[in-house]
Image (cartoon, rainbow, N blue to C red):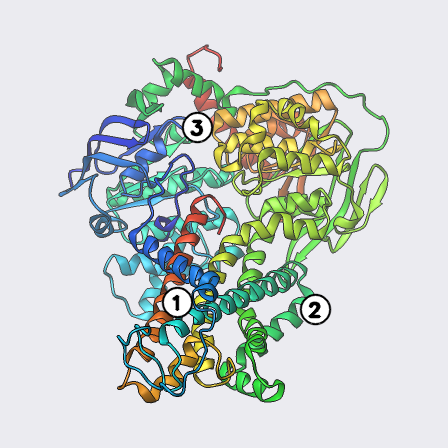
Amino acid sequence: MTAALELVSAPTVRRRHRLPVTVALALGILALTALAVVFGGVIYPDATRQDILSGLLPAGTPGHPLGTDELGRDILAMTVAGAASALVGPVVVAAGSMVLGIVLGTLAGYERGWLDIVISRWTDLLLALPVLLAAIVVSGVFGGGYWVTVALLILLFSPSDIRIVRAGVLEQTARPYIEAARMLSLSRWRVMFRHILPNVSTLVLTNAMLNVAFALVAFSSLSFLGVGVPPGTADWGRQLTDNRAIMFENPWAVVVPAVLIIVVAAAVNLVGDWIGQRLSQVGVAL
Amino acid sequence: MTGVQITGLTVIGHDGAMVQPLDADIAPGRTLAVIGESGSGKTLTAKSLVGLLPRGFRAEGSVRIDDTTIELTAGDATWRTVRGGIVTLLLQDPFTSLSPVHRCGEQIGWTMDAAGRRLSRGDRDRAIAERLAEVKLPARVARAYPHELSGGMRQRVAIAAALAANPRLIIADEPTTALDASNQAEILDLLRAIQRERELCVILISHDLGLVRGRTDDVLVMRQGEVVERGATADVLSQPRHAYTRALIDADPALAGRTAAAPVVAEGDDAPLLRVTGLVKDFGERRVLDDVSLEIGAGRIAGVVGESGSGKSTLARCIAGLEREDAGVIAFDRVELAPGRSSRTPAQMQIVFQDPYSSLNPMMSIGAILREALRVARRPAGEVGSLLEMVGLPVEFARKRPAELSGGQRQRVAIARALAPSPRLLICDESVSALDVSVQAQILALLARLRDELGIAILFISHDLAVVRMLADTVTVLWDGRVVESGPCAQVLTEPRHEYTALLVAAAQRENSTITVGSAGEDSTE
């Protein structure tokens, strides 16, 4: 029965904020990763140093707990140093596409008319672009590199943000409190950013968290294909592609970064879901 | 066919029992009314009987429906097998109880599917058309989306959907609050006819005593989670024993007559504050407003009455500039206003909407909402306190958020916000129809006081003639987008010239007379 689907709002009911175990674990993983980003350079100031003379060493070698790769680079040091590219890039991508989404999505949803048509067709166009092909073409034209990839991913991630914000704004704009704001002749900017935006923030933030996870996987894929970070950079995706050949001599060289990509992406997802739930409980209208 | 027995129904929330142990029996084909104002526990009682209590509440006790006994402590899996097929809930809000992205016919079809009846496409369409005909809707409604229908039509669709699975017990939670008087009676009579025919049990939750009387067999009066009075409906309403029951009866607008005597304004003085002439508005092919004219004098209250879909909200929105009229002239203080918001200033007019739950930005505190409105009028932020005082709310409310307020309190805040730019005209678009009778009476009294104290003119739009009569100096009756009658309130009510007006008046008076006869109590409301 449809009538039974009505969500019951119970503002007077206080809920205990107990942290679920999975979320606590995910937060722990993210905290460790963040620590690695901040202090990685202190622990391993020279993570990418090559030692071709010693060459490949197995795990457990003194001084190299996870061994080294063919170029004699320490796997543990490389992995710790790789945290920076694994976390910073995706966060910048998610934040960047969120800002694009908020600005373009709000404009499209509130102003409607030709602006909406232009912005919506632009998102359609971006969605139609195959990510990998676009990345390969762009790195071919601009020479690739970490920040070129970041810029490209911001662009390619923005359609989902734009569409989500636009849909949220469309829904809110029809509500009486927005019409009441129009009756007060408030400026359109005030209506958009003071009234509408806070009410779609749950959607936007939850989507941004999911985007961090997607961006991490996208980054790693691009690095694995050799169009993300340049060779010699500490990066988990790069490690995967570089160390494929020594998978049987030193499995840790591949397993550790691969597992980390999965675990960190999953942790970001879990925390993102949890934040979304918490926000919608505080009374943010979805 | 043994009807419904409720045994020891209790609802427990964080702060203890919200509904004290309650027993009730309903014989097949009979209707039990549960009345009380908001906070009395009547909605919690209803929700506990379908296993839809909000988070943080739990129920105890059991309910037996014919041969099925359901423990109210049952989990969601159990309820899912019972809901729809055996017991069903009709909700009060026609705005949210239907899915906005599915056609109405489809939604009626879901309940049929849930009841386990597999039909061929043609049979199914015919069955859906029959269900729609039962609630007096044309078959084409099956193809419509809820947003294409008026509030009243949507509630009819919800009723059709609820009845489609042939449930044994229907719990109707204020099902007709948003319908106009003639529709309200019609829908409930229809529900009653179907109920008698199929020997269904109905629990009707309502604050509207006029509806309860004559359409229900027994009544429970609830206050603060306790049953304070029970018995046959006719007996309880004609000889209320409990002071609270008497207070409820007295607060009913159908009975109470005018709350505020309108000051006599000298005739023949200067031009009206607002003059609407020949207003026309089309939505696509449909003409929603057809040559509508209207006048409001400064400091007067003009009522606009009409059923849902008559175009009364569109009229309000055109005057407010939220909608652009296709033809006609809207003149404010002798100055013609171009269509749209840009030709109007906040100090000319403000509007108070129907739904108190979405009228306030949920992310802003009451203080922030009022400060923003004051800033528009270049009034100091310190006046928030006096605004709140003016609408009868304590100053501490400035720190609260909308979610912490009741419907009536939110509507007061919406009125305070509308008053901040000191408008000369206040448009009330069904502003009291989502509220309980007692709260409704308070808001009406507030509006009458504001008119007297501030000299503000009010355009009061409602489907409820009984409510308009309490407040308005003049009445305009809208029917299908046209003005069928207008004039001084008393004249229109006593000598209706159009048959639709006569129908409305008769509907309002029917409620009035039944209640007047029934009310023996002389106690005044709080």
**To which quarter of the image does residue B387 belong?**
top right
Residue B267, numbered circle: none
Residue at the image position 45 percent from the left and 85 percent from the top: A225
Badge 1 vs badge 3, beta-carbon distance below 8 Å: no
Secondary element type, mark 1: helix
Secondary element type, mark 3: helix
Q: Are marks 2 and 1 on the same chain?
A: yes
User: Can you give x and y, in whole percent of width and height, for residue A22 in the image?
Assistant: 30, 56
Pointer 1 local density, CA inside 10 Å: few below 14, some 14–19, many at least 20: many
Q: Nearer the viewer, residue B335 or B271?
A: B335
Q: Amino acid at mark 2?
A: Trp
Report the chain holding disc 2.
A
Specify the farthest residue to the left.
B67
Q: Mark 2 = which residue?
A: A114
Q: Are marks 2 and 3 on the same chain?
A: no
Residue A265, numbered circle: 1
Residue B106 in sight: no
The residues tagged by marks 1 and 3 sit, at their Cα atoms, a distance apart of 61 Å
Q: Mark 3 = which residue?
A: B210
Name the front one of labels 2 and 3.
Answer: 2
Q: Is residue B2 left or right of residue B263?
A: left
**To which quarter of the image does residue A243 belong?**
bottom left
Specify the farthest residue to the top.
B522
Report the chain holding disc 3.
B
User: Can you give x and y, in whole percent of width and height, for residue B362 in the image?
Assistant: 54, 42
User: Can you give x and y, in whole percent of width and height, for residue B95 in the image?
Assistant: 48, 48
Q: Is residue B289 left or right of residue B82?
A: right
Q: Amino acid at mark 1?
A: Ala
Q: Is residue B125 left or right of residue B200?
A: right
Q: Is residue B460 above or below residue B513?
A: below
Q: Amino acid at mark 3?
A: Gly
